[in-house]
Image (cartoon, rainbow, N blue to C red):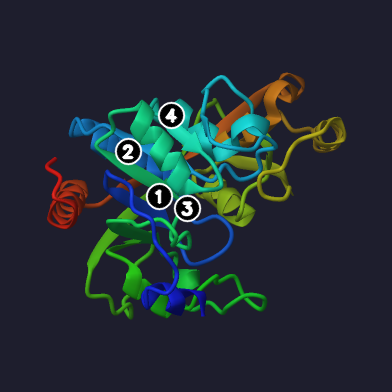
Amino acid sequence: MRNVLYDRGIFHVRKLARPVVSVGNISVGGTGKTPFVVALGELLKQRGIAFDILSRGYGRTASGIAVVDPSGSPGQFGDEPLLLARKLQVPVIVGADRYQAGLAAEKQFSSALHLLDDGFQHRRLHRDFNIILLPADDYCGTLLPVGRLREPITALRRADAVVLPNPIEQLRFVGQVWPVRRQIELSGAGGNLIAFCGIGCPAQFFDGLKRASQKIAETVAFRDHHSYEQRDIEHLLRLKKQTGADGFITTEKDIINLGAFSAQLQPLQSAGLRMELESPEQAITGMLKTLEQRSGCRF
């Protein structure tokens, strides 16, 4: 019903002065949105296009609009905005009202466009290009509360590009389709490790480590955006002793949420998910062409 009211213009949509590119999905949990925003941001930087990122800042304890300080904490800004700010070194603005965050960005920075992180359902803000990440499970999924889908598969009609980590032959989509490769990047020398994480789909992380030939002594899954406490660290240390593991491995996002606790889990390795478009130049050229047609801006 909410989507119908937006489609019919009954609910008001606010528009920023500069184009907005939304990256999102139609399900709850992790589909790789943050690594994809990093990949898209790197392509924009290669083109010399200045951009900022607008994010809700999920999990932050602070309120209001704020520009992320890369040296800050998850409580101030949220773990994913911090990760984006550190990896891309571009302005990241957090706030529940993404329109106000965008106004603040346009007042303070000279970005040519905004990337809207996890924004597909945030329809109050006008966007000029919609990107959806669609894992194979979502195509055959069911709606909440039975399944993981926030919206039915027909919501793809609002998308300008669908990112497919896995081939989906039966997908009928008339817009741009962007095949993408996912690769786990390991930071350390390996060993027999305790793997732990607090992300949307922990099984994907653990399976990715195994595909990368990483030896795993034990796995531990916390809730998404988990804020670590001393008892969690003690539990992990007990597991290390019980299994005879050589150390620990976790995600880049969890490294941020661990903060000073990382010192107690040495040796601690991080694993990052890297996403690479199979045809990056074709994808970015098509997106920029559409943005120019819709917004009148030149890139």
Q: Which of 206 and 36 is in front in this view?
A: 36
Q: Where is residue 238 in the image (x, y as percent from the top left)?
A: 87, 34
Q: Earlier in the sequence, mark 2 or mark 4?
A: 2
- Image position of 188 with respect to 209: above or below: above
Dot in front, 2 or 1: 2
In space, the residues marked 2 and 4 are separated at their CA atoms by 10 Å
Q: Where is residue 280 in the image (x, y as percent from the top left)?
A: 21, 47
Residue 195: name its quadrant. top right
Instruction: Please name the amino acid that badge 4 sits on.
Output: Lys
In space, the residues marked 1 and 4 are separated at their CA atoms by 17 Å
- Please name the residue shown 43% across and 29% down the image: 87
Residue underneath mark 3: 118
Dot in front, 3 or 2: 3
- Please name the residue shown 51% across and 33% down the image: 83
Q: Which of marks 1 and 4 is nearer the N terminus?
A: 4
Viewport quadrant of the C terminus: top left
- Please name the residue shown 39% across and 34% down the image: 105
Q: Residue 41, labelled with which disc?
A: 2
In space, the residues marked 3 and 1 are separated at their CA atoms by 19 Å
Residue underneath mark 4: 87
- Image position of 203 with respect to 141: above or below: above
Crowd class of label 2 (few under 14; some 14 to 19; many from 20; radius 10 Å): many
- Image position of 117 with respect to 147: above or below: above
Q: Helix or strand or loop: what does disc 4 sit on?
A: helix
Q: Evaluate whether residue 183 shows in this view.
A: no
Residue underneath mark 1: 182
Q: Helix or strand or loop: what does disc 3 sit on?
A: loop
In space, the residues marked 4 and 3 are separated at their CA atoms by 17 Å
Q: Which of marks 2 and 1 is nearer the N terminus?
A: 2
Instruction: Please name the amino acid that badge 3 sits on.
Output: Asp
